[in-house]
Amino acid sequence: MPSLSQLLTEHHQVLVLDASSQSIQVGLVRASGPALWRSTPDEAGRGIFASVAGILTEASLSLHQVDAFIFCEGPGSMLGTRTVAMAVRTWQTLKARPAYAYQSLALAGAFEWHRHGLRAFTVIADARRDTWHCQSIGADGELLPLRRIPVAELPAGERVTPDHFRAWSTPPHPTAVCAYDLEPMFSALTATDLFHLADAPDAFQHEAPEYKRWPAQIHSIATADKK
């Protein structure tokens, strides 16, 4: 998994898109020159494209001059992450460029560990139906595999949840709030391996969706349920 520094060595101007939280965040990260960032509380279908247009105008660039994309694949807002993935795939058809994905809770956990000291803790986010996305971080900073588990099975010890993430259930006590602001995160974690090449950009899911087969049958009086 490459770090941001490694990606910027190969791709000099990278567009970053994150709609996992209620704050849409877009950035232009460059090998030479300061990064540009924008955020908006607008819904994803509008906020992503307005923010991208604003940043490119500020940088005096066109979309074709972007060398690669970095996007958040989740967990978080499924609508937001799918909208971002759709945008990246569309832009790749206009001009072939690589896309690299990262996970929101891994980014939040790495930043929290970097900023507030070396210790083990867990980052959680609501996954609905009384389950939680669970990203554990070891005392050495190792990011363990992301899991989705029932609230009763969450690890003991320190827990945090990212700011501005939607929650349908009250986080289990005690759970503190941690930052989810991409500008300081990307600035602090340039050497951290967080990204992976996404051949087909899409929203993260713990397992592939299952669909119930529907047996085709012509309805008639003979097949009607007689009660």
Image (cartoon, rainbow, N blue to C red):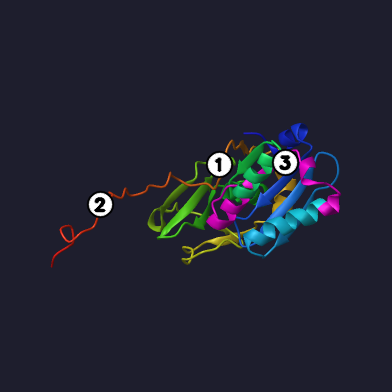
Looking at the rendered structure, the number of numbered marks drawn on it comes to 3
Residue 94's tag is none
At label 1, the amino acid type is Leu
Count neighbours of disc 2 (C-alpha within 10 A) and say few if under 14, some if 14 to 19, many if 20 or more.
few
Q: Name the residue under label 1.
A: 143
Residue at the spot of label 2: 217
Q: How far apart are marks 2 and 1 (CA)?
A: 50 Å
Displayed quadrant of residue 11: top right
In terms of depth relative to the viewer, which is nearer, 98 or 153?
Answer: 98
Label 3 SS = loop
Dot 2: element: loop
Q: 78 left or right of 185?
A: left
Residue 58 lies in the magenta stretch: yes
- Mark 2 vs mark 1: which is more N-terminal? 1
User: What amino acid does circle 3 point to?
Assistant: Thr
User: What amino acid is found at the position of numbered circle 2 in the picture?
Assistant: Gln
Q: Quadrant of the N terminus?
A: top right
